[in-house]
Image (tube, rainbow, N blue to C red):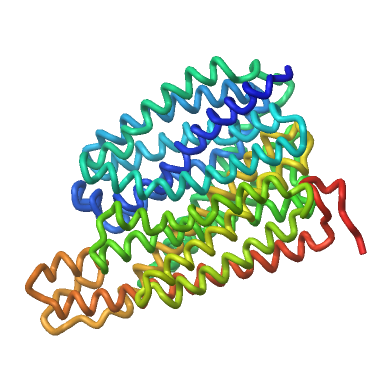
């Protein structure tokens, strides 16, 4: 069914609203975390899981939900996902304890995992012209960045006037409007009952991802438990091995590894993962640093990190519009190289010059915007339409996995370096080593030397983490550059230029 141009772009708006909800919920808690920790009495491990439960469960379920969408229809999957998301938002808003909030966040992830591949698959099906589709996908990719950046701002705004539950309650009216609009605008449901969906594969993917995240989190602690790390790595390894073995035996695999033979597809997947790692890492550590060390309000800290999204908007839209002319290499590898320059500026100036810090964030965003907007086109343009659900799932796993590893690794590394390097003044309890929050609570108004020692240690930890982020983006630029070096204009691999 060919939809009119007006209906296509209206549908893109609805898919964009769905994607905004999903990405907002990843980052809306960054600015709200200090408030949540205080109100619910969450410890440092619980506070990390309040954030991490959502991307861990989502990343584990995404592969299965994309392929399930190919079977039951992407329109139906989107509607089911929206409904689950709305109910889970209500449960999260009224959670009385850290444990119930973690469970509600996991339930939110189930809804998000059903919705996310459906948004991109419906765009792939609806926009048949390649140039129009590249532009639509670029807008979709930009919204992932915008949602990520708006999260801390909206979180900060809501916390100024309402209680912390409002950061979840805001989802409900958007869900209701999107449900009605999808019923009116989306093409008929494109179910294909001949496609098989394998629950066991989905669960094995979840086991592998959870094991990997737990291993990363534990390794980055100041006092890691070797046995626990070994068990987590074993879980991840066995889960991944069993998943891969099962895919090779299934007539309708959840993931067909043959799609990874396409270099442009692989470059797109890596670009999405590296970009989300950088953006999520910067947001998480920068909102915390400027609230705790500089005394920024949640809103002001959110506005500061939004500079990255502001830088991303023009390059993301320009990337989608010019892809058919310039090709993937300058936009993906070039964009990531540019963001490395911005990251170095942030690294060198975060505690000396606000102007240079913001400039660094803008440059970083500009580079990541170009890379992310066309990463989606590289992925979706290099698979047949019948694989749309599978390809969109792979992309979203790379999005979520990038954010997930950033929060798990960089959040834990920040705490570990702080704990290892703080020079406690005489007579201060050892619990001040746990986190900057703990040290500030102990210091109160009466111990300025503890505040200075804790802030200095935190700044050292921030520098270390920014160094890791910068190195990761630089590696991403090199790898994607090598993968795309023979790739010509356009998004598909139909136009390579071999030397």
| Farthest right residue in view | 499
Task: State left or right for residue 62 relative to residue 97.
Answer: right
Q: Locate residue 136, reporting x and y percent.
A: 65, 37
- Between 405 and 383, the residue placed more toward the observer is 383
- Between 202 and 229, the residue placed more toward the observer is 202
Residue 234 image-quadrant placement: bottom right
Q: Locate residue 167, reporting x and y percent.
A: 31, 39
Query: Relative to residue 52, is residue 163 depicted above or below?
Result: above
Q: Residue at x 19, y 48 (%)?
A: 39
Q: Residue at x 41, y 28 (%)?
A: 174
Query: Relative to residue 176, is residue 223 depicted above or below?
Result: below
Residue 462 image-quadrant placement: bottom left
Visible residue check, residue 314? yes
- Between 98 and 201, the residue placed more toward the observer is 98
Query: Relative to residue 134, is residue 408 depicted above or below?
Result: below
Quadrant occupied by the C terminus:
bottom right
């Amino acid at each position: 069914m060919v939809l009119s141009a007006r209906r296509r772009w209206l549908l893109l708006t609805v898919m964009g609203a769905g994607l905004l909800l999903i990405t907002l919920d990843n980052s809306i808690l960054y600015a709200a975390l200090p408030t949540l920790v205080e109100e619910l009495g969450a410890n440092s491990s619980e506070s990390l899981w309040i954030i991490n439960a959502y991307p861990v469960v989502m990343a584990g379920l995404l592969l299965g939900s994309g392929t399930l969408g190919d079977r039951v229809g992407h329109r139906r999957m989107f509607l089911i996902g929206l409904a689950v998301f709305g109910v889970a938002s209500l449960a999260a808003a009224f959670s009385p304890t850290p444990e119930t909030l973690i469970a509600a966040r996991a339930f939110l992830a189930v809804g998000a995992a059903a919705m996310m591949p459906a948004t991109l698959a419906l765009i792939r099906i609806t926009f048949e012209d390649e140039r129009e589709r590249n532009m639509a996908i670029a807008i979709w990719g930009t919204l992932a960045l915008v949602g990520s950046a708006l999260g801390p701002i909206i979180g900060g705004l809501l916390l100024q006037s309402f209680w912390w539950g409002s950061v979840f309650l805001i989802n409900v009216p958007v869900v209701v409007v999107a449900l009605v609009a999808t019923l009116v605008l989306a093409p008929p449901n494109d179910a294909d009952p001949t496609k098989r969906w394998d629950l066991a594969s989905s669960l094995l993917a979840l086991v592998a991802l959870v094991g990997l995240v737990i291993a990363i989190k534990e390794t980055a602690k100041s006092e890691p438990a070797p046995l626990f790390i070994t068990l987590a790595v074993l879980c991840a390894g066995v889960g991944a091995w069993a998943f891969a073995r099962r895919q090779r035996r299934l007539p309708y695999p959840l993931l067909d590894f043959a799609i990874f033979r396409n270099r442009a597809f692989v470059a797109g997947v890596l670009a999405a993962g590296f970009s989300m790692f950088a953006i999520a890492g910067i947001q998480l550590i920068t909102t915390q640093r400027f609230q705790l060390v500089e005394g920024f309000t949640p809103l002001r800290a959110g506005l500061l990190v939004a500079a990255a999204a502001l830088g991303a908007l023009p390059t993301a839209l320009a990337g989608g519009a010019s892809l058919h002319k310039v090709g993937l290499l300058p936009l993906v590898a070039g964009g990531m190289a540019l963001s490395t320059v911005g990251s170095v500026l942030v690294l060198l100036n975060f505690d000396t010059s606000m102007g240079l810090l913001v400039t660094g964030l803008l440059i970083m965003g500009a580079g990541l915007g170009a890379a992310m907007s066309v990463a989606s086109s590289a992925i979706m343009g290099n698979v047949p339409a019948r694989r749309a659900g599978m390809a969109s799932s792979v992309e979203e796993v790379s999005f979520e996995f990038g954010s997930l590893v950033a929060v798990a690794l960089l959040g834990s590394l920040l705490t570990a370096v702080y704990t290892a390097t703080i020079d406690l003044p005489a007579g201060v309890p050892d619990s001040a080593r746990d986190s900057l929050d703990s040290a500030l609570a102990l210091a109160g108004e009466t111990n300025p030397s503890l505040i200075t020692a804790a802030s200095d240690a935190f700044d050292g930890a921030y520098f270390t983490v920014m160094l890791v982020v910068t190195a990761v983006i630089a590696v991403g630029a090199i790898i994607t550059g090598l993968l795309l070096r023979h790739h010509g204009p356009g998004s598909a691999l139909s136009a390579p230029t071999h030397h």
